[in-house]
Amino acid sequence: MARNTIKCIVTGAERITNNSYLGKKAEKAGVSVDCIREHYVSKPAVQEIKAKLAESGQTLQTVSEKLKMSAAKLENILILNGKVKPERLKELKVEPVDTAKPDVSHETVEQS
């Protein structure tokens, strides 16, 4: 993945983006740019997830199992994609930027 693209973790589709957009979104959410990249889901995919959640009998757990991810990750995806609402940020299950530990494996990949 080129640095000026971002990849949807549900569909695999990529779109062009820029670092200033990602930086502002990350700053607003209080997370790292890498966290935004790791939780990116395209708008159509988010709409499909929300539609599944609206169906009777579909819970966050059920939908997350179908997508082969944890319910916590799915909740983070729903919070971070689209407009970031400050009141929902306290529900994030990721470490804020100022206390996040560096991801050594991520740094190694980027240096290669």
Image: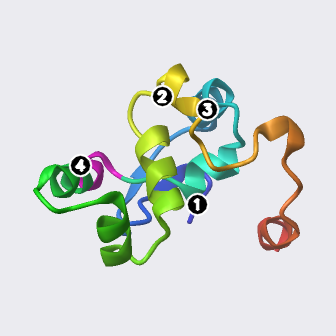
Residue 80's place in the image compared with 85, above or below, is below
Residue 18 image point, x, y percent: 56, 38
- Secondary element under disc 1, as helix, strand or loop, is loop
Please identify, in this view, whether the residue under mark 2 or under mark 3 is nearer the observer. 3
62 on left or right of 39: left
Q: In which quarter of the image is residue 8?
A: bottom left
Please identify, in this view, whether the residue under mark 1 or under mark 3 is nearer the observer. 3
Residue 71 image point, x, y percent: 46, 63
Queried whether the magenta region covers residue 98, the answer comes back as no
**Residues under numbered marks 1 and 4 in contact, where contact means CB atoms less than 8 Å apart:** no
The residue under label 3 is which amino acid type? Answer: Lys
Q: How far apart are marks 1 and 3 (CA)?
A: 31 Å
Judging by the rendered image, the residue that carries numbered circle 1 is: 2
Judging by the rendered image, the residue that carries numbered circle 2 is: 84
Q: Distance between the residues labelled 4 and 3?
A: 20 Å
Residue 11 visible at all: no
Q: Tell me if mark 1 has few (under 14), some (14-19) or many (20+) residues whose alpha carbon lies within 10 angstroms of its own.
A: few
Identify the residue shown where x is 58% and y is 58%: 38
Q: Distance between the residues labelled 2 and 4?
A: 16 Å
Q: Tell me if mark 4 has few (under 14), some (14-19) or many (20+) residues whose alpha carbon lies within 10 angstroms of its own.
A: some
Between discs 2 and 3, the one toward the N terminus: 2
Judging by the rendered image, the residue that carries numbered circle 4 is: 50
Which dot marks residue 90?
3
The residue under label 2 is which amino acid type? Answer: Val
**Residues under numbered marks 2 and 1 in contact, where contact means CB atoms less than 8 Å apart:** no
Q: How far apart are marks 1 and 4 (CA)?
A: 29 Å
Between discs 2 and 4, the one toward the N terminus: 4
Magenta stretch secondary structure, dominant: helix
